[in-house]
Image: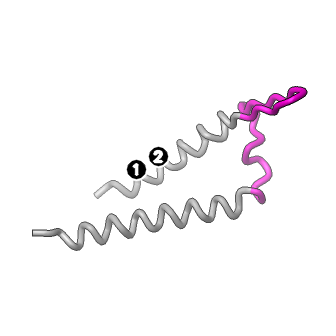
Amino acid sequence: MIDFPGIGKILLIIGLVIAGIGVLILLGGKIPWLGKLPGDFYYKGKNFTFYFPLATSIIISIILTVILMFISRR
């Protein structure tokens, strides 16, 4: 038999995660330090520009890991 309450919880969590990502995208330009941390690599050459936000990616990964850890606890 199909577990509808379980599917409902999963859909709700997925929706909240998508909404959270949307909020981060909307507010991303208003957070002054996002993308400009000391571990973010930026190189501008004559014909190209290379940008790799390593430190920002690590910070976002840690925050998402903590949030998902709290969500997955029962």
Image point (66%, 59%), residue name: 25
Residue sitting at the far front: 47
Please state the horizontal and vertical placement of residue 66, each as a whole percent of the image.
47, 48
Residue 53 sits in quarter: top right
Up-down relation of residue 51 to residue 26 (above or below): above
- Disc 2 target residue: 65
- The answer to whether 49 appears left or right of 74 in the picture is right
Residue sitting at the far left: 1
Element class at badge 1 = helix
Please state the horizontal and vertical placement of residue 47, each as a whole percent of the image.
86, 29
Image point (30%, 72%), residue name: 8
Instruction: Name the one closer to the observer, 44 or 68.
Output: 44
- The answer to whether 17 appears left or right of 2 in the picture is right
- The answer to whether 63 appears left or right of 68 in the picture is right
Q: Amino acid at mark 1?
A: Met
Q: Amino acid at mark 2?
A: Thr
Q: Callout 1 environment at 10 Å: few (<14), some (14 to 19), or many (20+)?
A: few
The Cα–Cα distance between marks 2 and 1, rounded to whole angstroms, is 6 Å
Image point (75%, 38%), residue name: 37
Q: Which residues fall within the magenta stretch?
A: 29-51
Q: For residue 20: magenta?
A: no
Image point (86%, 26%), residue name: 45
**Mark 2 vs 1: CB contact within 8 A:** yes
Q: For residue 36: magenta?
A: yes
Instruction: Name the one closer to the observer, 28 or 50.
Output: 50
Up-down relation of residue 54 to residue 74 (above or below): above
- What mark, if any, has residue 69 been given in the picture? 1
Up-down relation of residue 21 to residue 36 (above or below): below
SS assignment for the magenta stretch, majority: loop
Q: Looking at the rendering, in which quadrant would you find the C terminus? A: bottom left
